[in-house]
């Protein structure tokens, strides 16, 4: 098993790591991003996730499952072009859930599972 930390403040405060490579998969924790709107936060979260996947030796092409969490489902559609570009010809199974996030400033949280190399 390999644990990957991104050094984020919440990791130490809450007691988790950005990703864990185990059982043939890379499990990436729910990830929020920085920015003033849902699209910029989505882009930022994807960058953090991409770095974790790369450290595990994987990429977005290896992602088999993605969960999106948003406090307002109406904000999901503006993210679609970015998500389609990110996953390209290798789209994963996906779920979007409308729910509260850890802080109201966050507009999207993204969690992925990828096949480990």
Image: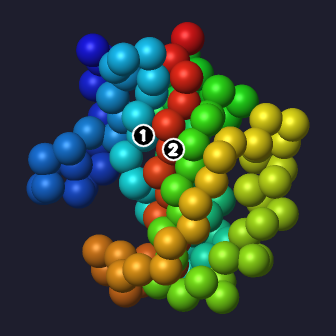
Disc on the earlier residue, 2 or 1: 1
Q: Quadrant of residue 23?
A: top left
Q: Secondary structure at mark 1?
A: strand
Image x and y of residue 77, in percent: 75, 77
- Image-based side of 44 in relation to 56, left or right: right
Image x and y of residue 68, in percent: 54, 63
Query: Where the C terminus falls, by quadrant?
Result: top right
- Which residue is more in the foreground, 65 or 57? 65
Note whether 95 is above or below 7 in the view shown: below
- Give the Cα separation between the discs numbered 2 and 1: 5 Å
- Image-based side of 97 in relation to 40, left or right: left
- Image-based side of 69 in relation to 1, left or right: right
State the colouring used for the structure image. rainbow
Note whether 117 is above or below 112 in the view shown: above
The residue sitting at 59% across, 84% down in the picture is: 73
- Image-based side of 83 in relation to 75, left or right: right
Instruction: State the residue position of label 1.
Output: 28
**What's the mark number on residue 112?**
2
Q: Secondary structure at mark 2?
A: strand
Q: Are marks 2 and 1 in contact (CB under 8 Å)?
A: yes
**What's the mark number on residue 102?**
none
Image x and y of residue 34, in percent: 50, 67
Note whether 29 is above or below 40 in the view shown: above
The residue sitting at 55% across, 23% down in the picture is: 115
Q: How many marks?
A: 2
- Is residue 44 among what the camera can see? no
The residue sitting at 42% across, 40% down in the picture is: 28
Mark 2 is surrounded, within 10 Å at the Cα level, by few (under 14), some (14 to 19) or many (20 or more) other residues, namely many
- Which residue is more in the foreground, 69 or 85? 69
- Is residue 73 among what the camera can see? yes
């Amino acid at each position: 098993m390999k644990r990957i930390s991104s050094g984020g403040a919440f990791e130490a405060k809450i007691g988790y790591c950005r990703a864990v490579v185990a059982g043939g998969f890379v499990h990436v924790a729910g990830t929020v991003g920085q920015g003033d709107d849902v699209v910029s936060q989505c882009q930022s979260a994807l960058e953090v996730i991409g770095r974790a996947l790369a450290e595990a030796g994987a990429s977005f092409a290896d992602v088999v499952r993605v969960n999106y969490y948003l406090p307002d489902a109406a904000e999901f559609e503006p993210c679609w072009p970015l998500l389609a570009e990110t996953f390209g010809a290798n789209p994963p199974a996906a779920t979007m859930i409308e729910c509260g996030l850890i802080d109201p400033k966050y507009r999207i949280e993204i969690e992925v599972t990828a096949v480990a190399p």
